[in-house]
Image (cartoon, rainbow, N blue to C red):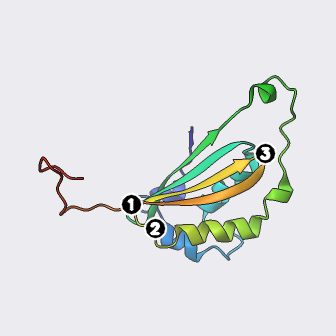
Amino acid sequence: MIIVRHKSERKVAGGFPAASAAAAASDSHGPPILDSVMDLLRKTYHGQIAIVTQNHRVVQVERKENFDPEELSGLIPLALNEDGLNLPVVRKRITEALRGLEFGQVILVVKKGRLDRIERLLKERYATLQGVYGDGI
């Protein structure tokens, strides 16, 4: 797992604002966190990149790379497929997925160097609900 953190994130208490990341999607320079995510996406052949948010802020970026035994032995070359990464469109979709996400994750699933799907995991907390034994749910 690779955790990416930038100096610019430390200036904002609690991480990089997800709303700002979403708002700056059209800016070619954009926030550094999106640049890092796009760079990780280019370097991933099989795996996932998870962007974790808490209180509408990006607090962590995780990269999980999966390897086929044949890939590790060198029988299958690991060449990135730039055709599967329409970068401006992917960047826009990532920021759309981040928009309004208070607690949760945006997960980018990459297969054979191509972006396969974007998953949006929403986490909600219910402080007033109680379980059978008086604890939360």
Going by the numbered disc 2, the residue's amino acid type is Leu
Identified by mark 3, the residue type is: Lys
Please state the horizontal and vertical placement of residue 97, each as a whole percent of the image. 56, 68
Q: Position of residue 54 (x, y in %)?
A: 40, 59
Of all residues shown, which one is farthest toward the front? 132
Q: Nearer the viewer, mark 3 or mark 2?
A: 3
Residue position for label 3: 112
Occupied quadrant, residue 119: bottom right
Q: CA distance from mark 1 to mark 2?
A: 18 Å
Secondary structure under tag 2 reads: loop
Q: Residues within 10 Å of mark 3 (few under 14, many from 20)?
A: some
Picture disc at residue 101? 2
Mark 2 Cα-neighbour bin, 10 Å: few <14, some 14–19, many ≥20: many
For the point 64% across and 55% down, the residue is 37
- Indicate the quadrant where residue 44 lies: top right
Q: Is residue 73 visible?
A: yes
| Disc ID at residue 13 | 1
* Identity of the residue drawn at 20% across and 52% down: 136
In the picture, residue 85 is in which quadrant?
Answer: bottom right
Among the two numbered marks 1 and 2 on one chain, the one whose residue lies closer to the N terminus: 1
Disc on the earlier residue, 3 or 1: 1
User: Depth check: 20 or 46 in front?
Assistant: 46
